[in-house]
């Protein structure tokens, strides 16, 4: 057929074998191979059935996303080929294993019968790429399982397992075994039973199967929940079209799909898909580097972060010991972990047996020699250099040779801590984000002496515990917090100049940020933020500017620690932020004290530019200093760790859309109107040179 598709005879069964590693994505070659196989099958009446099977670890996991930017991309050839497959006059079956996703599901739905192996995952994840199933998934799935469940699956992009797929009627049977054998046995039974072709496209969706206002409601939900995603709306419209005759629905799906494929939102989300996978790759690392085995973990400090970090390992089935200084602290830490698990169980996400299994993997100790057998030890004690140095020195002695020692510091110098252990090659930063059991991002900080196998092992561990890991070099705040610092700086200057927290947050939330800077710091803790600034000042890192981050320091002094004390940038009604005249007074007083002129003309655009353009500028500095390997890594840090909207593709992707020349001009504009004695507005050399050459940040590569 083609190099990726073969037609093999197994008695009276024609087996279509797709072999397009790694995930059998549908490429033009696979589609051409399928068409050629159909020609051969149609011409040979000695075949009694057609079986679709994929080689390797998975069935087709989707359309080939790398081809979606091709201006000539079209789903029409694939759709016509699927129509031919469905129209065959002898039974067509698919044997499903691995991940049956997107275009793979659409291939399976074009078959007459489906059998799956037990651990198969099913889904229509297109929404996560800002598109919709474009090969009749929106038309066939509702016909097969009903509109409500089909819309739920397509709109959420969530996956279901074989059991749920069987219950929903997506598969006819679930059978343990080698996929090809399972498929052949299944096809033989079809032949023996004289099974007739069964075509989903011939079925109808009854308009009475859902309430009359079902789609109006669904459109409202889409606009509310996924306000920034045109795909959410188009998905509802496409599924609604499944009520029409098949050909009409097909035309509507095609139009809605194409609208999304060329949309900036989808391009941004596709960029993130590949950036996330790229981030896992470490330039210059030899492929054959031998990874260290991580079968047990130790965590020092069972506070906010230590407990959350421990949950990640327990969730992955890795025994973990937590070390504390007092029984009370240990009990508090483990108690919090248990209550987190119990909250998940109450929501039906875990069974009580699973809660107990996970708790059984966690053990506490007041004696740090309990760490002697651990393969990986992560320190998560208070953010204080002297304390962390002492803890690291002790870990250097207690941990067995070959164990990895990691620090969860947010800002401190990983190289200094590495030296304190006396074995810096074993040391790496593992910067989790709060809440550590929820947030997907993990910044992996490579120290000057971190050995390549330590780095590679930690990247693999990150994948195992479900994190998206990005490597950062050593600098204040690493990638994320270093960029957040300039963002917070401007938020506070804007406040002192007269903008209200709600105006500041509203401006960036209007772009899709999960939370503006004031709400974010109120949640993370003003005390945490202020202490970091104060410590950085002590270490000589701050500019000689008395007004720098004056607001957070004042709020800290006044005991306004944010949500936890009921007041910070906002006042709190439970967890709901409300405008607080007191913050306005504080900002006015600070402005007067620092000679900052208050204005009433601060608009939304100025807020956006002043918050985001310095952040982008800092990102460019991080690239040219070699702190981040690639622009996409920075985009992943901000989307996975700081609630930056994925439909904007991350700050650097967004910068390219705005235009680097425009950004450089606005930075220079603010240098003029705000003054630039401390270099806040100086355009980075990289941004300047890319803007001058009309190049994009996203295309930048380290030389
Ligand atoms: N197209 C092209 N490449 C793909 C791909 C796809 N659909 N899915 C995965 N890949 C590539 C990855 O980029 C990666 O490449 P790399 O090794 O060069 O970095 C490689 O395959 C392996 O992928 P992962 O690292 O993600 O492997 P995992 O085992 O962790 O996960 C997976 C496998 C669950 C299949 C995951 O890759 C995944 O979720 N893929 C995307 C699935 C998807 O979104 N499908 C829908 C596509 S859109 C579509 O089908 C449109 C249709 O309706 C017309
Ligand atoms: P925390 O104050 O909640 O917990 C620290 C814990 O360490 C306390 O329970 C304390 O008893 C324990 N501890 C102190 N000295 C110890 C020692 N010698 N041995 C064993 N235990 C000891 O602090 P939190 O917020 O968990 O922070 C821990 C680290 O994580 C810090 O480095 C912080 O910068 C970092 N971090 C914090 C984030 C946050 O949002 N809270 C986010 C990312 C990193």
Image (cartoon, helix red, strand yellow):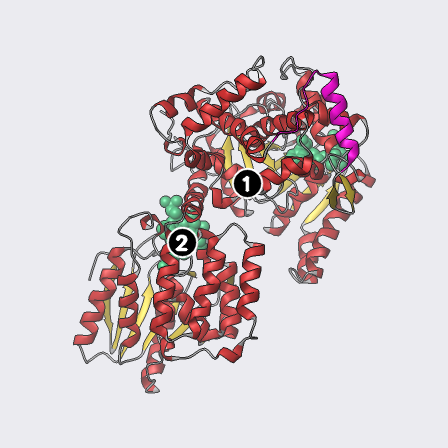
Tell me if residue 167 comes above or below residue 658 in the rendering.
Answer: below
Task: Using the rendered image of the protein, determine whether residue 35 is visible from the camera's viewpoint.
Answer: yes
Name the element at disc 2: helix
Residue segment shown in magenta: 580-602
Q: Which mark is residue 32?
A: none
Q: In this view, does 328 lie to the left or right of 312?
A: right
Q: Is 673 situated left or right of 393 in this image?
A: left
Question: Which quarter of the image is occupied by the C terminus?
Answer: top left
Q: Where is residue 286 in the image (x, y as percent from the top left)?
A: 38, 33
Pointer 1: what residue?
644
* Secondary structure beneath label 1: loop
Picture quadrant of residue 250: bottom left
Q: Do the residues labelled 2 and 1 touch (CB within 8 Å)?
A: no
The question of residue 273 being in magenta is answered with no
In the rendered image, residue 583 lying in the magenta stretch gets the answer yes
Look at mark 2 in the image and give the residue it sits on: 260
């Amino acid at each position: 057929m083609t190099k990726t598709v073969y037609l093999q005879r197994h008695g009276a069964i024609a087996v279509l074998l797709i072999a397009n590693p790694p995930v059998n994505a549908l490429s033009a070659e696979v589609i051409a191979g399928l068409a050629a196989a159909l020609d051969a099958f149609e011409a040979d009446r000695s075949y009694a059935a057609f079986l679709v099977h994929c080689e390797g670890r998975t069935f087709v996991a989707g359309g080939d996303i790398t081809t979606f930017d091709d201006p000539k991309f079209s789903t029409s050839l694939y759709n016509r080929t699927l129509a031919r497959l469905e129209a065959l006059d002898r039974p067509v079956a698919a044997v499903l294993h691995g991940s049956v996703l997107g275009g793979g599901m659409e291939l399976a739905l074009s078959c007459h019968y489906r059998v799956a192996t037990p651990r198969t995952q099913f889904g229509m994840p297109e929404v996560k790429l800002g598109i919709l199933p474009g090969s009749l998934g929106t038309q066939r799935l509702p016909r097969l399982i009903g509109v409500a469940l089909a819309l739920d699956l397509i709109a959420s992009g969530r996956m279901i397992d074989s059991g749920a797929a069987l219950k929903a009627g997506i598969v006819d049977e679930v059978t343990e075994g080698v996929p090809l054998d399972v498929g052949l046995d299944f096809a033989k039974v079809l032949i023996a039973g004289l099974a007739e072709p069964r075509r989903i496209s011939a079925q109808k969706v009854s308009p009475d199967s859902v309430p009359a206002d079902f789609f109006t409601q669904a459109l409202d939900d889409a606009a509310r929940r996924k306000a920034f995603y045109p795909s959410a709306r188009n998905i509802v419209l496409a599924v609604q079209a499944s009520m029409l005759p098949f050909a009409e629905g097909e035309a509507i799906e095609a139009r809605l799909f194409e609208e999304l494929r060329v949309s900036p939102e989808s391009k941004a989300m596709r960029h993130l898909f590949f950036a996330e996978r790229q981030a896992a790759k470490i330039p210059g690392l030899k492929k054959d580097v031998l990874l260290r085995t991580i079968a047990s973990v130790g965590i020092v400090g069972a506070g906010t972060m230590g407990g959350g970090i421990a949950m990640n390992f327990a969730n992955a089935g890795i025994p973990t010991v937590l070390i504390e200084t007092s029984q009370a602290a240990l009990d508090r830490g483990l108690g919090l972990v248990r209550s987190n698990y119990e909250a998940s169980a109450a929501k039906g996400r875990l069974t009580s047996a699973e809660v107990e299994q996970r708790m059984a993997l966690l053990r506490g100790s007041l004696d740090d020699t309990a760490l002697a057998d651990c393969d990986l030890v992560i320190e998560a004690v208070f953010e204080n250099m002297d304390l962390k140095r002492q803890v690291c020195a002790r870990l250097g002695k207690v941990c067995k040779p070959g164990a990895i020692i990691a620090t969860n510091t947010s800002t401190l110098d990983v190289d200094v801590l590495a030296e304190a252990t006396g074995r810096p090659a074993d040391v790496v930063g593992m910067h989790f984000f709060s809440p550590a059991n929820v947030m997907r991002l993990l910044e992996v900080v490579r120290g000057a002496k971190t050995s390549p196998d330590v780095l590679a092992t930690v990247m693999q561990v990150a994948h195992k515990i479900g994190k998206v890991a990005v490597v950062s070099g050593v600098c204040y705040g690493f990638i994320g917090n270093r960029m957040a610092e300039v963002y917070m700086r401007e938020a506070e200057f804007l406040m002192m100049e007269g903008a209200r927290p709600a105006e500041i947050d509203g401006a960036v939330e209007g772009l899709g940020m999960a939370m503006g800077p004031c709400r974010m710091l109120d949640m993370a803790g003003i005390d945490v933020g202020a202490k970091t600034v104060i410590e950085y000042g002590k270490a000589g890192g701050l500019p000689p500017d008395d007004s720098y981050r004056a607001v957070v320091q004042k709020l800290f002094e006044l005991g306004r620690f944010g949500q936890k004390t009921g007041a910070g940038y906002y006042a709190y009604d439970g967890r709901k932020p409300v405008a607080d005249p007191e913050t306005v007074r504080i900002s006015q007083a600070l402005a007067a004290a620092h000679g900052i002129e208050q204005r009433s003309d601060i608009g939304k655009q100025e807020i956006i530019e002043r918050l985001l353009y310095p952040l982008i500028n800092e990102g460019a500095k991080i690239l040219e200093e070699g702190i981040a390997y690639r622009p996409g890594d920075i985009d992943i840090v901000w989307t996975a760790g700081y609630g930056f909207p994925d439909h904007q593709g991350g700050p650097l992707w967004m910068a390219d859309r705005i235009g680097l020349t425009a950004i450089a001009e606005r930075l220079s504009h603010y240098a003029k109107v705000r003054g630039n004695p401390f270099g806040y507005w100086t355009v980075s050399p990289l941004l300047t040179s890319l803007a001058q050459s009309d190049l994009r940040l996203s295309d930048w590569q380290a030389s």
